[in-house]
Image (tube, grey):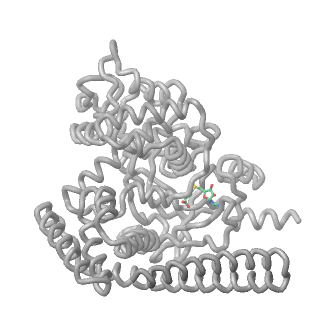
């Protein structure tokens, strides 16, 4: 035993010396022998390639696993009632744990069960953090892959289900034809059937709307923008004097969606933060801050409703807005102040909003609101020049040729309609509210693009129209009327 220990020790010593010797030889060779260096380099590259290939294989196996697991996880519908969700959650977690215990061959099944549990858990982020601590890394990798693939599929599927079929239009993607860094016609609205002059293709309520500061103090409903003809039906807020409504229904809806956050309170002692938002709107004539605040309230109300109805799986209002294009706007100190005001007002009642509404998100929302807002007019002027979007420079919804603009709204479908100087539709407001109807002004064939005029086109010269469009919307119009006129000049 003693001997063998010695032998072993000796062997170890020799091995150590040999190791050191080899290392010295290796280093000498590496520094001095070009052939050896080349060989070494080749071998290093070969090893890296082998490693890369191995990783690629693992990655591609993971991709297949993720896709298969996601398909399995989404086959069965998810429960909608709270009790069913709780029960299913426990069942899925138990199934996942049992599959993990069954070994690697069952990891994919474990991921399916854990993923289904994640989809019905009220705080998914919290559950992911729990998974991170408790679930094997390979299972977690599949779950995380499923999560990002699910988001990707959701994104890709968006225009298959939106707009709803009963609106008779589809959004067609032309982005392949457009320079990705330039504004242009990326998504257009296309008719799904023939339409005759005078037809209403669809009607649409806005996600959020706002009165123009120019009608401040005049009798317009702050919720549906209807003119309040009969003062006896007018409803006012019990606490402040900045809003009025045409009915108790509008008053209740407005309170639920926005006024509960935005009411400045008593005139003699108003809430300074809420007052700041109303002053920015009334005195500085900026729509964005108040519109954004109202949008947040609306979004929260819609998501709450969906929770009650068990339809949280539907696209969120936020996701829908995210799909709209926007012009970027530069942030100013006013923006920072308004962003903080909104966080303070809405965040006080909805915790977490402060973290959600970063400065970057505020600015992208501002860009979206100003770029996509459509002017709301009184119904008597249905065929007047329509208005679309707003210039970030002036922060004001445009309404060429119309002095009767009462408000502006964000319409999720109509916002996609592109401009033409020879439009085939006009946005109208036949109910005298912010509900918009798309009325046909030229016959439209199935598959044809639906266009409206963003500015007053009438018989204005091409150059004037093009200049205004470029200044306000940063694109050069290539509609048939412009193209023909410009070709005639050559
Ligand atoms: C009010 S936004 C509409 C964007 C729309 N919400 C979307 O997400 O596609 C208007 C923008 O659409 C593009 N656009 C509209 N009409 C166009 C046209 N005739 N030619 C090129 N671009 C046009 C321009 O980039 C313009 O600034």
Going 15% across and 72% down the picture, which residue do you hit? 91
Give the percent coordinates (x, y) of residue 216.
44, 27
> Up-down: is 307 above or below 254?
below
Query: Extreme right residue here?
Result: 490
Left or right? Give the position of 248 relative to 212. Answer: left
Residue 107 visible somewhere in the drawing: yes
Going 45% across and 81% down the picture, which residue do you hit? 63
Left or right? Give the position of 334 relative to 483. Answer: left
Going 44% across and 45% down the picture, which residue do you hit? 380
Query: Extreme front residue here?
Result: 2
Residue 214 visible somewhere in the drawing: no
Q: Is residue 63 or residue 290 the one in the foreground?
A: 63
> Up-down: is 232 above or below 81?
above
Q: Is residue 151 or residue 126 the one in the foreground?
A: 126
Give the percent coordinates (x, y) of residue 430.
39, 51
Going 70% across and 60% down the picture, which residue do you hit? 477
Placement of the C terminus among the 4 image quadrants: bottom right
Give the percent coordinates (x, y) of residue 110.
27, 78
Query: Extreme top residue here?
Result: 268
Q: Is residue 93 or residue 287 the one in the foreground?
A: 93
> Up-down: is 290 above or below 482?
above
Left or right? Give the position of 52 relative to 67. Answer: right
When asked about the image quadrant of residue 209, the answer is top left
Q: Is residue 186 or residue 337 the one in the foreground?
A: 337
Placement of the N terminus among the 4 image quadrants: bottom left
Q: Quadrant of ligand 1?
A: bottom right
Counting labels gives 0
Give the percent coordinates (x, y) of residue 444.
52, 72
Left or right? Give the position of 482 relative to 270. Answer: right
């Amino acid at each position: 035993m003693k001997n063998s220990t010695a032998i072993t020790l000796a062997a170890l010593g020799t091995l150590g010396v040999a190791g050191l010797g080899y290392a010295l030889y290796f280093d000498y060779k590496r520094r001095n022998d070009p052939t050896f260096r080349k060989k070494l380099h080749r071998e290093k590259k070969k090893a890296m390639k082998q490693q890369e290939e191995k990783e690629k294989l693992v990655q591609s196996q993971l991709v297949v696993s993720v896709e298969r697991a996601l398909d399995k996880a989404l086959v069965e519908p998810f429960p909608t009632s709270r009790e069913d969700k709780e029960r299913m959650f426990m069942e899925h977690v138990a199934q996942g744990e049992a599959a993990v215990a069954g070994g690697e061959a069952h990891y994919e099944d474990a991921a399916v069960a854990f993923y289904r549990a994640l989809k019905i858990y009220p705080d998914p982020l919290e559950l992911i953090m729990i998974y991170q601590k408790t679930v094997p890394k390979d299972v977690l990798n599949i779950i995380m892959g499923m999560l990002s693939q699910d988001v990707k599929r959701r994104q890709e599927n968006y225009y298959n289900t939106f707009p709803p079929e009963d609106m008779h239009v589809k959004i067609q993607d032309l982005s392949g034809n457009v320079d990705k860094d330039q504004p242009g016609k990326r998504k257009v609205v296309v008719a799904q059937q023939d339409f005759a002059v005078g037809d209403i293709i669809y009607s649409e309520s806005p996600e959020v709307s706002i009165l123009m500061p120019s009608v401040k103090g005049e009798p317009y409903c702050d919720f549906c923008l209807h003119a309040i003809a009969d003062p006896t039906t007018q409803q006012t807020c019990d606490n402040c004097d900045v809003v009025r409504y045409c009915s108790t229904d509008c008053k209740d809806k407005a309170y639920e969606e926005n006024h509960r956050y935005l009411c400045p309170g008593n005139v003699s002692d108003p809430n300074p933060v809420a007052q700041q938002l109303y002053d920015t709107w009334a005195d500085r004539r900026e729509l964005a801050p108040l519109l954004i605040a109202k949008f947040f309230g609306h979004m929260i109300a819609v998501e709450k409703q969906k929770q009650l109805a068990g339809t949280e799986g539907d696209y969120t209002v936020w996701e829908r807005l995210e799909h709209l294009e926007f012009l970027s706007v530069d942030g100013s100190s006013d923006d920072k102040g308004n962003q903080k005001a909104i966080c303070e007002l809405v965040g006080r009642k909805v915790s977490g909003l402060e973290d959600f509404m970063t400065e970057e998100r505020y600015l992208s929302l501002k860009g979206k609101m100003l770029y996509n807002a459509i002017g709301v007019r009184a119904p008597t002027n249905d065929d007047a020049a329509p208005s679309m979007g707003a210039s970030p420079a002036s922060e004001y919804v445009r309404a060429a040729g119309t002095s009767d603009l009462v408000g502006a709204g964000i319409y999720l479908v109509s916002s996609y309609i592109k401009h033409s100087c020879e439009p085939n539709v006009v946005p109208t407001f036949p109910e005298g509210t912010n509900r918009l109807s798309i009325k046909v002004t030229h016959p439209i064939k199935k598959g044809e693009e639906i266009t409206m005029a963003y500015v007053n086109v009438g018989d204005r010269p091409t150059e004037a129209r093009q200049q205004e469009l470029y200044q306000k919307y940063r694109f050069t119009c290539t509609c048939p009327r412009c193209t023909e006129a410009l070709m005639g000049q050559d």
